[in-house]
Image (spheres, rainbow, N blue to C red):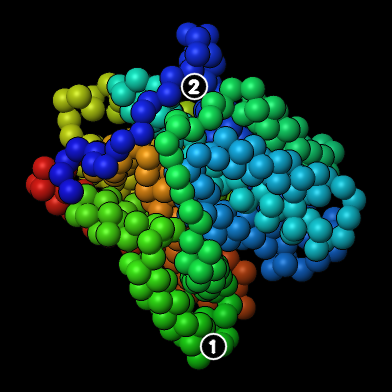
Amino acid sequence: MTGQPVGDVAARAVPGTRSEARLLVPALMFVALVVATVASLGTPLITSVATSLHVPLGSAQWTLTVPLLSGAVATPVLGRLGAGPHRRAAILATLAVVVAGSALTVLPLPFGWLLAGRAAQGIGLGLTALMMGVARDHLPEERSAAVIALLSVVSIIGAGIGYPLAALLAEVGGVRAAYGLGLVVTAAALLTAWRSVPDAPEGRSAQLDVPGAVVLAAALLLVLFLAGDRDLWGRHLAVAAGLAVVAVVLLCGWTIIELRSAAPLVDVRAVRHPAVAGANLAMFVGGIGMYLLLTLITRYAQAAPVAGYGFGLTTFVAGLVLVPFSVLGFVAGKLTQKVRTRIADPLLLAGGAVVVGVGFALFAADRSNLTELFAVMGVLGFGVGGFSAAMPGVILAVTPRSETSSAMSVNYVVRSVGYSLGSAVGGLILATGTGPGHLFPDDRAYTTAALVGIGAMAITTLTSLGLARRGTG
C-alpha cells in the first residue's frame, strides 16, 4: 500500500442541497457526542446505584464496565456493516437499541435490567466510526478530514460533559433521574440521524463474517474482563493467567480466520500496514497513559483529607474538574486542523503525547491545591484532543474510502482496551501503595503511577516519531 487510498471505486454521494450538507455536520457531531456521553454516565453513578438499588459496590461497578465491553464487541461488527450498502439502516437500528437500553435504565426495574440497559447503551460506542465513514463519503475531502478529526475529539470529551450533569441530576433527583438524561439525548440523536444521515454510496457491498465476529467478541470480552477485574488477579492468579492464555489463543485463531476469509470482519492485511499498525500501537500505549492520568486526578480530587491529601470533593464538584479537559480538548482539536497542512499527522501525534507527558510531570511535581488539578486536567485535555484529532489522518491516509468505518472501528477497539488497561494499571499501583488496614493509598503511590504514565507517553512519542520518519500521513 502507498500513502494514498487504494481500491476506492465507490462514487462519492453528496447530499442533495447545500442546506442538507450544512445540517449533516452538526448531526454527525451530535450523534457522536451523545453516544460518548451516555457511555460515561456510569462513572459518577456507581455509588448511587449501590446505595439506591442495594447492591455491593463491586456489582455497581459493572454499570461502567458492561457498556465498555458491549461497545468493544459491537464496534468491529458495526464497522463492517458501515462499509456496506446498509450503513444508514445500521446506524438507525443501533440508535434504536440504545434508546431501548436507556429506557431500561430509567424504569424502576431490578439491577439486572439496569445492567442490560447499560449494555445496550454501550453498543452505541461503535457509531463514531460510522459517523466518520459518512463524513468521508458525503463531504468534500478537506472538509471531511476536519470533521473526522473533530468526531474523534468529540468521542473523547463526551465524558467531561456527561460526568458533571449526571452527578448533579443524581444529587437532585436520584439515580433514575440521572439516567433519564441518557434517554432524552439518545431519543434526540435517533431523530437527528433519521432526518440527516444519508444512504451509503451505490456499489458498496459488505458481508458479515459471523465466525470472525463471534471469536473476536469472545476474545475481547476476556481481555476487557481481565483488565477490569483486579481482584481476580490478586485472589485467583492461576485462573486469571489461564483466561489470559485463552484470550491469546482466541485472538490468534481469529487472525487465522480473518486471513482465510473472503469477506473478513477486519482486513488484517491492511491493519498490518506500517502506518496503521504504528498508529494503533500509539493509540494502545497512549490510551493506557491518558486514562491512567484521568483516573489518578479524579480519585485524588475525591480522596478524603483524612488520607493526608485530597480534597474530599462531592461527585458533582469532582465532575467539574473534567470541564477543563473537555474545553481544552475541543480547542486542541480545532487548532490541530489548522496546522495539519504544515505539520504531518504523526508529528502531531507525538506532540499530543508530549503534552500528556507534561501533564503527568506536573501532577507528580505538585498537586497540593485544587487549582493545580484543574490546570493538569486542562493540559491532559489539550494533549488528548490534539492526539485524537491527528489519529484519523494517519490511518485514513492509507485506507480506501469504503473501508473508513472498518479501519477506524479497529482503532476504537484498541483505544477501549488501552483505556481499560490504564484504569487497571492505576488501580493496581494505588492498591499496592495502600498499607494493611488503610483505606487510602499512600500519597507516594500517586507519584509512582505518574512516573509510569510518563514512561507510557514516552513510548507513544517514540512510536509516533517512528511513523513520521517513515513519511506516513
Residue 7 occupies quadrant: top left
- What amino acid type should be assigned to the residue bearing mark 1? Val
Q: Amino acid at mark 2?
A: Val
Left or right side of 418 for 61: right
- The mark lying in front, picked from 1 and 2, is 2
Label drawn at residue 95? none
| Count of labels in the image | 2
Q: Mark 1 sits on what residue?
A: 239
Q: At x 90% / y 51%, what residue is drawn?
A: 108
Residue at 43% across, 40% down: 204
Relative to 33, 385 lies left or right? left
Task: Examine the image and state in which quarter residue 459 appears.
Answer: bottom left
Label 2: which residue?
Answer: 25
Say whether marks 1 and 2 touch (CB < 8 Å): no
Which badge, 1 or 2, comes first in the chain's sequence?
2
Q: As drawn, which residue projects farthest toward the top?
A: 18
Left or right: 202 with respect to 282?
right
Q: Quick one: label 1, few (<14), some, or many (20+) residues within 10 Å?
A: few
